[in-house]
Amino acid sequence: MDVRIGFGYDSHQLAENISLFLGGVQIPHAKGCVAHSDGDVLIHALCDALLGAAALPDIGSQFPDNNPDFKNIDSKILLSRVVELIENENFTINNIDITLLVEKPKIAPYREQIVRSLQTILKLDLNRISLKAKTNEKMGFVGREEGVVAYAVVTLIKNERERK
Ligand code: MG
């Protein structure tokens, strides 16, 4: 089997009076991610992991932040486009594993909703989607609630017939 591993990282600054989106779910909070798009740090890390596994150019190259088309764009649309790109390269997503670093708010109450949101776009079984959220124990920029971080690891399987 031709298995490809991809890794993605993203971070965003938090600021007041911005909506917080994580994994395509709007989460009630006083702060949200400063960004050209909707600032969905989780989806951005996941997109880079998927693109990386397929050895395709990264999210910043696919969706430049100086392009007005992507201003305030719903990151679920970006993820859908990334899924199309990797399917065009004859890859199937095998599994995804995401770790979020967020001091506040607590993610646990929204975890299932986020997983289902990702499942809808990725068309993956629930047992192939892992999402963990942690605080940074009050350390660093995450701990001071100045920003959030997401890490994603994925595996893709190259379709045998089309292998190149
Ligand atoms: Mg980002």
Image (cartoon, rainbow, N blue to C red):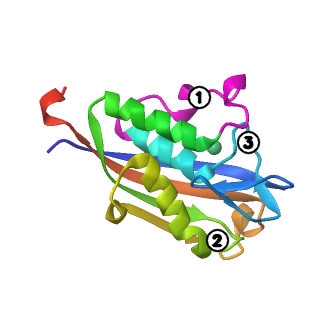
**Residue under circle 3?**
35
Please give the label number shown on residue 136.
2
Q: Nearer the viewer, residue 86 or 124?
A: 124
Left or right placement of residue 19 versus residue 112 in this view: right
Q: Position of residue 22 (x, y in %)?
A: 62, 56
| Cα distance in 3D space between marks 2 and 3 | 22 Å
Q: Is residue 58 visible?
A: yes
At x 49%, y 41%, the residue is: 48
| Cα distance in 3D space between marks 1 and 3 | 13 Å
Image quadrant where residue 71 sits: top right
Main SS, magenta region, reads loop
Highlighted magenta segment, given as a residue range:
53-73
Q: Is mark 3 within 8 Å of ligand 1?
A: yes
Circle 1 — which element? loop
**Residue under circle 1?**
63
At x 33%, y 28%, the residue is: 88
Q: Nearer the viewer, residue 115 or 95?
A: 115
Say which amino acid is labelled 3: Ala
Q: Position of residue 20 (x, y in %)?
A: 72, 56
For marks 1 and 2 on the same chain, the one whose residue lies earlier in the sequence = 1
Query: What is the crowding at mark 3: few (fewer than 14 residues within 10 Å), some, or many (at least 20)?
Result: some
Circle 2 — which element? loop
Left or right placement of residue 94 versus residue 76 in this view: left
Q: Quadrant of the N terminus?
A: top left
